[in-house]
Image (cartoon, grey):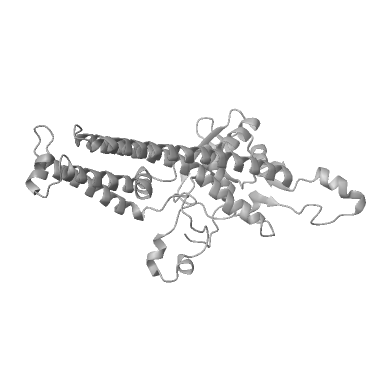
């Protein structure tokens, strides 16, 4: 089985005109898209993909709106606090409370951003590996795109880390809010109740209860330096599918003046980890029927190994088959249909090369 056998796109009657008398019969009976035993016509498969794409776009839009909502909370809270912070009767401590509240909003928004990236990853994968391929005949999507999408649907996981999500939202929105809070706090100490140029008086005004103003200044400035350093540290994290960068092509062609540093400017539109690959051993008394069904319905190669049951002292055939993680349920159903008493072992494989998997001559 070749790397593209899972996605066998046959020519439709419109692409290969048959005899006039058989046109209607061909359109109604011949499947043009086969995928692991399923037979779909191109219109059926494309319709399903369009509906999936619309659903993922809608999900992403909902979470994008939730991101805006959290930012609005931070902005409204900040300006509400600042509107009362410069009155004679207010304390500059309310600004510190607002600082903690904005930080809490930042963590909420980072969590929401990870969910947004979950749906954005799927959208980007369909755009680059399915819809883009449809626009350039002949229609040849990447051999493993459907497997990557299927695995993500079955085993969803966040495409970016919490650190990257925090850093991205911090740089995009919250650094400016923090800057406004810092400027307002300094202005509050300087101007209220009356303007002063005496540094000792500013320190005295910074005091909070029994806590000396020097410690308050040190703690506050340290906090802002940590925030700024964290935003700079996370710049190099580029796993987000939301990055507006091309799916294919070298960075030296896109950023010719950037040199080697441009290689860091890339987004992982597919997970950086490889999709789990497995090795299956099947011990059954009906090896021939099971093997034929695997070959026919799953399109996977099967190897028969000679074995002997030490308890029964009988010779038997052990079937060996390499799979990806999304094919295990299908394999269990196939084996159970032929031999409910079969014994099936699924173990992880470090690498699988050859037809149907990574080509043997291709290196990462």
In the image, 327: left or right of 45? left
Q: Residue furthest top?
A: 341
Q: Is residue 200 above or below residue 17?
A: above
Q: Residue furthest left?
A: 200
- Foreground residue among 272 and 184: 184
Residue drawn 46% across the image and 65% down it: 251
The residue at 91%/53% (across/down) is 20
Residue 144 x/y as whole percent: 57, 51
Indicate the quadrant where residue 337 lies: top right
Q: Position of residue 204 (x, y in %)?
A: 9, 41
x, y percentage for residue 357? 56, 52
Side of 40 where 235 appears, left or right: left
Q: Is residue 290 visible?
A: yes
* Vertical placement of residue 129 versus 94, above or below: below
Give the residue drawn at x 48%, y 55%: 244
- The quarter holding residue 36 reads top right
- 251 or 25, which is in the foreground? 251
**Which residue: 11% across, 50% down?**
197
Q: Is residue 135 above or below residue 349?
A: below
- Taking depth in this image into account, of 39 and 240 the one nearest to the observer is 240
Residue 280 visible? The answer is no
Disc tally is: 0
Pinpoint residue 316: horizontal percent, then vertical percent.
58, 38
């Amino acid at each position: 089985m070749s790397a593209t056998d899972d996605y066998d796109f046959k020519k439709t009657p419109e692409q290969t005109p048959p005899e006039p008398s058989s046109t209607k019969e061909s359109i109604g009976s011949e499947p043009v898209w086969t995928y692991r035993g399923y037979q779909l016509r191109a219109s059926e498969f494309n319709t399903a993909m369009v509906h999936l794409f619309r659903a993922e776009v809608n999900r992403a839009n909902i979470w994008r709106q939730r991101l805006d909502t959290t930012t609005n909370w931070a902005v409204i809270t900040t300006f509400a606090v600042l509107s009362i912070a410069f009155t004679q009767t207010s304390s500059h401590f309310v600004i510190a409370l607002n600082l903690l509240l904005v930080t809490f909003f930042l963590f909420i928004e980072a969590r929401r951003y990870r969910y947004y990236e979950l749906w954005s990853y799927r959208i980007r994968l369909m755009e680059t590996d399915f819809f883009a391929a449809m626009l350039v005949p002949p229609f040849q999507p990447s051999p493993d795109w459907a497997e990557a999408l299927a695995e993500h649907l079955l085993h969803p996981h966040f495409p970016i880390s919490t650190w990257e999500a925090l850093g991205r939202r911090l740089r995009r929105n919250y650094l400016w809010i923090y800057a406004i809070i810092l400027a307002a706090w300094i202005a509050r100490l300087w101007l209220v109740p009356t303007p002063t140029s005496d540094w000792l008086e500013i320190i005295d005004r910074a005091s909070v209860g029994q806590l000396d103003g020097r410690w308050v200044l040190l703690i506050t400035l340290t906090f802002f330096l940590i925030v700024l350093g964290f935003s700079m540290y996370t710049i190099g994290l580029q796993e987000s599918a939301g990055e507006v960068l091309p799916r294919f092509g070298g960075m030296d062609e896109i950023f010719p003046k950037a040199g080697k540093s441009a290689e860091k400017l890339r987004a992982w539109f597919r997970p950086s980890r490889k999709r789990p690959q497995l090795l299956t051993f099947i011990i059954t008394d009906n090896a021939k029927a099971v093997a034929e069904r695997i070959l026919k319905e799953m399109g996977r190669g099967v190897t028969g190994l000679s074995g002997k049951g030490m308890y029964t002292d009988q010779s038997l055939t052990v079937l060996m088959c390499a799979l990806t993680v999304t094919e295990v349920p299908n394999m269990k159903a196939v084996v159970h249909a032929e031999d409910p008493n079969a014994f099936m072992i699924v173990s992880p494989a470090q690498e699988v090369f050859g037809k149907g998997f990574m080509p043997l001559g291709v290196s990462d």
